[in-house]
Image (cartoon, rainbow, N blue to C red):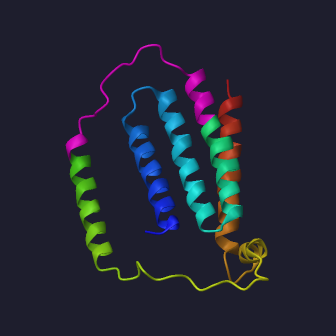
Amino acid sequence: MTAMQIFFLFFAAVILGASVKVVTERNLLYAALWLVLSLLGVAGLYMMLNADFLAMVQVVVYVGAIAVLFIFVVMLVRRDKDTGSQLNANWGAGALIATAVFGMLALILRGFGGYGATAAELPADFDALTALGQALVLPSAYLLPFEVASVLLLAALVGAVYLAAKK
């Protein structure tokens, strides 16, 4: 086993373990902290893929902004007592659907033969950040989805300000 495979297995185990703790933790603050660990594991996978820009965006945007926002919300809207059960009435159907989806994914991955394939080497003068920027603004690439996402985020921001300002 190579060092890269060991690192991948380590980050995968961290992500899976932290993700399970996010959904099973009763304390919401601890669940948010487990989410931070899971997101940091994803950033570690990006670093393994030499996607430094995406790793830094993952840390700054998701860990630095979104997860901290979750923690602030949990701390500001803190309930002193836990009311109710961790499971809802439909937990059996959810478990059945999750098992079926897992089974389908396992069947799909069983037929996948590209596990040992390696990616082609990039040229030494390849600039990933420039290629990403061009892909976001070229009309033949991702310009339309990028602009739709920006309009949706603007609409969500306007709606949040409207709801917050309403008395």
Q: Is residue 41 left or right of residue 47?
A: left
Q: Quadrant of residue 53?
A: bottom right
- Report the quarter where the N terminus lies: bottom left
Q: Is residue 110 left or right of residue 114?
A: left
Q: Name the residue at 69% across, 63% down.
A: 52
Q: Return the residue found at the far top.
A: 80
Stretch in magenta:
69-92
Q: Quadrant of residue 101?
A: bottom left
Q: Name the residue at 54% across, 35% down.
A: 33
Nearer to the camera, 146 or 134: 134
Nearer to the camera, 142 or 28: 28
Asked if residue 131 is among those painted magenta in the image, a careful observer would answer no
Q: Name the residue at 60% across, 68% down.
A: 49
Asked if residue 75 is among those painted magenta in the image, a careful observer would answer yes
Residue 144 rendering spot, x and y as whole percentages: 67, 73
Nearer to the camera, 40 or 48: 48
Question: Above or below — where is 116 with respect to 32?
Answer: below
Q: Total marks drawn? A: 0
Question: Above or below — where is 31 with respect to 150?
Answer: above
- Report the quarter where the C terminus lies: top right
Q: Quadrant of residue 110?
A: bottom left
Residue 31 rendering spot, x and y as whole percentages: 47, 34
Nearer to the camera, 155 or 141: 141
